Image (spheres, grey):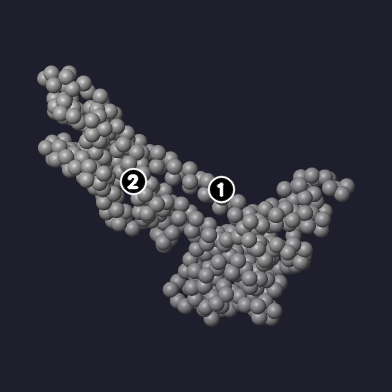
C-alpha cells in the first residue's frame, strides 16, 4: 500500500513539474491563503492572551461587593433605602460564610498628595494586608503593607507606578516622606506597573493600612468589600450567600440585586472567553474564505489538467487502470499543490509573526510604556494544527471534483478527444 501511494505521489509530482509555472502560481495562491489563516488565528490568540492577562492582573477568584440602594420594599421600608457597608460587615461575612477564603474592606477617597514642592491629587485606599495578595499587587521596590503595620496604625504607604513617576520622577521613592491630606506618611513600597484597575487605575493610587486610614477619615462606612472564594466553582454560591447574609443584616431582600452591587470576576472572565472565542471563530472564517479562493484556483487548474490529459486518461483506462487509480492520481496532484503551497504560507506567517514583536492594544490606550501587555502574534501548535486541518479540507475539496471527473471519463470517448 505504501509503495502504491509513493508511486502515485511521485507520478503526480512529475506531472506538476511539467507545468511548473502554472503549478507555482497556484501554490502562491494557496500560500497567501494559508498565511492569512495562520496570521489571523495568531492575532486572535494574541488578543485573547492580552485581554486575559490584563484581567488576571486584577486578581483571580475575586468577588467585590459595593453598596447600593434598594429597589424592593423590605421590612416595612420603602424601596430607595441607601445601603451602606460597614467595617464590621467584613468579619461578619468571614464568620458566616465558610466558602469565603479571605476578605478585606476597602475605603477610598481622593486627597491632595504633597512631596516637597510637588503636589497632586490621587486616590488613597485603606486596605488590609491580604489585599496585596488578593489583588496581585506586585512590588517593584520596597515592600507591601504588613500585619504589624495594620496593628500599629503605621503611617506607611505603597504608591502606584504613576504616583512614583509624577512625584519622584526617577528618584528613589522608598523611605521618602509624603503628605496625604496634610498628614505625613513614609513610602514603604512602589507597586509594579499594571494594566487593570479597580474603581480607578492602580497605577494612580496610594495604598495605606486600613487602620491608618482613620487618620484621614471616619472608617465606619467603607467603599467596598473584596472577597476571595475558596474555589471558582463556589463563586455563584458565595454571591448568593453574600446577598442573603447582608440582606438579613442590613434589611433588604436577597433578591434585590440593586441593594448591593456585586462584581464577580469569574463571570466577567467567562464573558470575555465568549467574546474572544467568537472573535477567533470570525477571524478563522475570514481566513478560510481567503484560503477557499486559493482552493478554487486549484480546482480550476486541475479541471484544465483533466481536459488537457483526456487522451492520456483514456490510454491509461484502456490499459487496465482502475477508476480509483485515476482518481488517486489527480487527488494526489491537488494535495501536493495544496500542501507545498501551505508549507510556503506557514513559513511566511512564521516570518511575519517573528518580525512583528507586538501589535498595539493597551499601549494605544495607556501609552507606550505598556507594550508588554500588547498583542503578541505567536504562532502556537494549536494554530498550526487548526490551519493544517483547514488546509487539508480545502485540498481534498479542490481535488475531489476534478479527480471524480477524470475517473468517470469513458476510455473510448477519451481516446477520440482532440
Neighbour tally class for label 2: few under 14, some 14-19, many 20 plus, Cα within 10 Å: some
Q: In the rendered view, tell whether residue 232 sits above or below residue 219.
A: above
Q: Would you say the residues marked 1 and 2 are in contact, meaning their CB atoms lie under 8 Å apart?
A: no
Q: Position of residue 229 (x, y in %)?
A: 66, 61
Secondary structure state at the residue bearing disc 1? helix
Q: Is residue 378 above or below residue 287?
A: below
Q: Residue at x 52, y 72 (%)?
A: 139
> In the image, is residue 382 above or below residue 139?
above
Q: Which of 33/415 is in front?
A: 415
| Mark 1 vs mark 2: in front | 2
Residue for badge 2 = 388
Q: Which quarter of the figure has residue 239? A: bottom right
207 left or right, relative to 275: right
Q: Quadrant of the C terminus?
A: top left
- Quarter of image, res 111: bottom right
Is tag 1's residue or tag 2's residue first in the polypeptide sequence? 1
Residue at the (29%, 53%) spot, across then down: 350
Please give the name of the residue rendered at 48% of the width and 66% of the height, measured from the top-left corner.
193
**Number of numbered discs:** 2
Residue 385 at least partly seen:
yes
Mark number displayed over residue 271:
1
**Residue 164 x/y as whole percent:** 50, 70
Q: Which mark is residue 319?
A: none
Image x and y of residue 115, in percent: 54, 74
Dot 1: within a 10 Å radius of its alpha carbon, few (fewer than 14), some, or many (20 or more) residues? few
Amino acid at each position: 500500500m505504501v509503495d502504491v501511494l509513493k508511486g502515485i505521489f511521485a507520478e503526480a509530482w512529475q506531472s506538476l513539474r511539467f507545468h511548473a509555472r502554472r503549478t507555482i502560481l497556484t501554490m502562491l495562491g494557496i500560500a497567501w491563503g494559508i498565511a492569512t489563516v495562520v496570521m489571523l488565528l495568531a492575532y486572535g490568540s494574541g488578543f485573547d492572551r492580552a485581554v486575559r492577562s490584563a484581567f488576571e492582573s486584577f486578581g483571580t477568584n475575586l468577588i467585590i461587593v459595593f453598596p447600593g440602594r434598594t429597589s424592593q420594599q423590605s421590612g416595612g421600608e420603602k424601596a430607595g433605602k441607601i445601603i451602606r457597608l460597614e467595617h464590621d460587615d467584613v468579619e461578619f461575612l468571614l464568620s458566616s460564610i465558610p466558602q469565603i477564603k479571605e476578605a478585606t474592606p476597602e475605603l477610598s477617597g481622593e486627597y491632595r498628595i504633597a512631596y516637597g514642592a510637588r503636589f497632586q491629587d490621587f486616590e488613597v485606599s485603606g486596605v488590609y494586608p491580604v489585599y496585596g495578595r488578593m489583588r496581585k499587587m506586585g512590588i517593584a521596590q520596597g515592600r507591601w503593607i504588613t500585619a504589624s503595620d495594620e496593628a500599629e496604625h503605621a503611617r506607611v504607604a505603597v504608591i502606584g507606578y504613576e504616583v512614583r513617576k509624577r512625584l519622584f520622577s526617577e528618584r528613589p521613592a522608598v523611605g521618602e516622606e509624603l503628605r496625604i491630606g496634610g498628614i505625613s506618611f513614609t513610602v514603604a513600597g512602589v507597586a509594579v506597573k499594571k494594566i487593570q484597575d479597580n474603581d480607578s487605575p492602580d497605577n494612580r493610587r496610594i495604598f495605606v493600612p486600613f487602620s491608618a486610614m482613620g487618620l484621614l477619615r471616619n472608617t465606619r462606612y467603607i467603599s467596598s468589600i473584596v472577597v476571595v472564594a475558596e474555589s471558582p466553582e463556589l463563586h455563584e454560591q458565595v454571591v448568593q450567600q453574600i446577598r442573603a447574609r447582608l440582606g438579613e443584616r442590613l434589611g433588604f431582600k436577597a433578591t434585590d440585586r440593586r441593594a448591593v452591587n456585586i462584581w464577580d470576576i469569574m463571570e466577567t472572565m467567562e464573558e470575555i472567553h465568549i467574546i474572544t472565542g467568537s472573535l477567533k471563530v470570525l477571524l478563522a472564517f475570514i481566513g478560510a474564505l481567503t484560503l477557499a479562493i486559493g482552493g478554487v484556483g486549484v480546482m480550476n487548474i486541475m479541471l484544465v489538467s483533466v481536459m488537457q490529459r483526456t487522451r492520456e486518461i483514456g490510454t491509461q483506462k484502456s490499459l487496465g487502470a482502475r477508476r480509483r487509480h485515476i482518481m488517486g492520481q489527480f487527488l494526489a496532484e491537488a494535495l501536493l499543490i495544496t500542501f507545498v503551497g501551505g508549507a510556503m504560507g506557514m513559513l511566511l506567517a512564521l516570518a511575519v509573526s517573528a518580525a512583528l514583536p507586538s501589535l498595539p492594544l493597551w499601549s494605544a490606550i495607556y501609552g507606550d510604556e505598556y507594550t508588554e501587555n500588547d498583542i503578541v502574534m505567536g504562532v502556537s501548535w494549536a494554530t498550526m494544527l487548526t490551519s493544517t486541518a483547514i488546509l487539508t479540507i480545502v485540498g481534498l475539496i479542490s481535488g475531489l471534483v476534478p479527480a471524480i471527473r477524470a475517473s468517470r471519463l469513458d476510455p473510448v470517448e477519451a481516446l477520440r478527444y482532440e
